[in-house]
Image: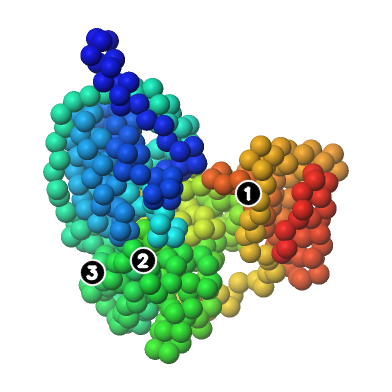
């Protein structure tokens, strides 16, 4: 290394706020922990890794947050200064960036998005060689930036829209000509324009809510896994007599579904509805769900002739496992839904919606009928409560050791999931925050109370104040 090069690298060294390099993505509060300088340094660091792995071109997209265009400009500059060619696909949902990474002549992609977080948040989702870039790879970006260990070159930038091709690809897999009445709520998130374009090409009647992209999210927070955020959609479904309602999160990779009676179908229920159809085409296939999903889902997959696989929580981890075991379908309780069957294996909520409509058309089974057929279960929501970062994994180990000493039936794939008295309870450490996550499920209220009491006792034994369930 020449002296001049060494001096340049030293000048380019950058320290990220330690809170923004997460397990699955990079995320922070704009103007507090995340700045344009971070976007540029991320471009240099990720671009250097990509170049060293043989990449020559990277696709970049961004969501509708007000901070996203400036962060995109800085990121693109950083990638270009590594010598890479950047294909800027512009504003859209995260799945459109994934689509570009799979269909264009590029070797990776970066999406600037704050996902379902408040308007002042933003961040970056990364992929390389058609695979999520996460975990230790993200932490390595911090080390590269701190050392200024960058590639240098004169790259180029091309602006190219993939919007029409993306919409065409989604509509391609729609089946049936059922005249369904559907209410759709984009929550003013990045999926709004694609939602409008796709529904214009589908049969039936489609009522659009909050389809105008607005990074302040004036109607409601764009997180369809929170019941409060679905109220407008529920009211519309009931008022208009819709067959179902569909909602999206801020960047369009998570879905919300309600039936004609405005009842919410949670992530594991949506999965079961879809899995039964997929297993008709792939009998015996492995279907993956994360450790937070209901036992009803795993039992239902087995009853439909599939091989259920309980796996770790995390959309990047689930996608990697799908490839490893050649699974056609997977999902998470958080309503990331992944199709390798007829699709690319990533999470696209608008594509998932199209597949739901297709199953309704083919089977004739409404979502309301499906929901009525499910066993009645009593469960807690996903409860998240503070735990010091240096204690959260230790607490999990302590609980596991006590349970195993008792001879309890414990699955420790991701925390501890304990089966007892016909139900189960879960305690796991969050990968992204200094919190523990708990959930309980039983066949009746009395047993649910026994399970939550059992969980509380374990937390007390580890010196923690149990949360309210």
Query: Would residue 154 appear left or right of 143 to someone viewing this image?
Result: left
Q: Residues within 10 Å of mark 3 (few under 14, many from 20)?
A: some
Given contact means CB atoms under 8 Å apart, are the residues at marks 3 and 1 in contact?
Answer: no
Is residue 393 visible to the viewer in this orientation of the structure? no
What residue is shown with label 1? 435
Give the residue at x 76% y 70%: 444
Given contact means CB atoms under 8 Å apart, are the residues at marks 1 and 2 in contact?
Answer: no
Find numbered disc 1 in the image and state the secondary structure of the residue it sits on.
strand
Percent coordinates x, y for residue 258 in the rendering: 48, 75
- Which circle's residue, 1 or 2, is located before the other in the chain? 2
Give the residue at x 66% y 43%: 388
Q: CA distance from mark 1 to mark 2?
A: 27 Å
Instruction: Indicate the colouring scheme.
Output: rainbow
Q: Residues within 10 Å of mark 2 (few under 14, many from 20)?
A: some
Q: Which mark is residue 197?
A: 3
Task: Give the quadrant of residue 51.
Answer: top left
Is residue 239 positioned above or below 200 on the image?
below
Which quadrant does the C terminus fall into? bottom right
Is residue 329 positioned above or below 12 on the image?
below
Percent coordinates x, y for residue 11 in the rendering: 30, 24
What residue is shown with label 2? 216
Q: Which mark is residue 446?
A: none
Which quadrant does the N terminus fall into? top left
Task: Give the quadrant of residue 268.
Answer: bottom right
- Which circle's residue, 3 or 1, is located before the other in the chain? 3
């Amino acid at each position: 290394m020449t002296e001049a090069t060494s001096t340049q690298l030293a000048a380019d060294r950058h320290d990220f706020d330690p809170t923004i390099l997460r397990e699955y993505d990079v995320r922070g509060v704009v103007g507090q922990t995340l700045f344009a300088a971070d976007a540029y340094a991320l471009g240099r660091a990720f671009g250097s890794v990509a170049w060293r792995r043989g990449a020559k071109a990277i696709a970049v997209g961004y969501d509708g947050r007000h901070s996203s265009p400036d962060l995109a400009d800085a990121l693109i500059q950083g990638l270009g200064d590594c010598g890479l060619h950047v294909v800027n696909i512009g504003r859209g949902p995260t799945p459109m960036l994934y689509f570009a990474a799979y269909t264009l002549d590029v070797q990776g992609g970066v999406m600037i998005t704050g996902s379902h977080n408040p308007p002042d948040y933003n961040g970056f989702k990364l992929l390389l060689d058609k695979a999520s870039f996460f975990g230790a790879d993200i932490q390595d970006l911090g080390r590269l930036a701190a050392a200024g260990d960058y590639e240098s070159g004169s790259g180029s930038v091309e602006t190219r829209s993939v919007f029409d091709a993306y919409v065409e690809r989604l509509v391609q897999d729609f089946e049936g000509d059922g005249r369904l009445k559907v209410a759709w709520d984009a929550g003013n998130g990045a999926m709004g324009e694609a939602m409008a374009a796709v529904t214009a090409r589908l049969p039936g009647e489609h009522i659009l809510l909050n389809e105008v992209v607005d990074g302040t999210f004036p109607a409601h927070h764009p997180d369809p896994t929170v019941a409060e955020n679905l109220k407008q959609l529920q009211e519309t479904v009931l008022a208009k007599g819709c067959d179902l309602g569909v909602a999206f999160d801020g960047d369009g990779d998570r879905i919300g579904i309600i039936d004609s009676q405005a009842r919410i179908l949670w992530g594991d229920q949506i999965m079961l509805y879809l899995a039964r159809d997929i297993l008709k085409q792939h009998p015996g296939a492995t279907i993956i769900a994360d450790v937070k999903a209901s036992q009803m889902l795993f039992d239902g997959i087995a009853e439909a002739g599939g091989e259920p696989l309980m796996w770790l929580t995390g959309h990047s981890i689930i996608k990697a496992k799908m490839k490893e075991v050649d699974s056609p379908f997977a999902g998470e309780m958080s309503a990331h839904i992944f199709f390798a069957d007829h699709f690319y294996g990533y999470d696209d909520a608008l594509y998932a919606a199209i597949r739901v409509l297709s199953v309704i058309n083919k089977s004739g089974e409404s979502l309301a009928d499906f929901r009525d057929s499910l066993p009645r279960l009593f469960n807690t929501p996903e409860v998240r409560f503070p735990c010091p970062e240096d204690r959260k994994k230790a607490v999990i180990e302590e609980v596991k050791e006590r349970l195993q000493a008792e001879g309890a039936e414990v699955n420790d794939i991701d925390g501890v999931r304990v089966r007892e008295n016909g139900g189960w309870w879960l305690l796991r450490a969050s990968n992204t925050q200094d919190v523990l996550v708990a959930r309980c499920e039983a066949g009746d209220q009395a047993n649910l109370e026994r399970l939550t009491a059992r969980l509380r006792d374990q937390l007390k034994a580890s010196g923690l104040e149990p949360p309210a369930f």
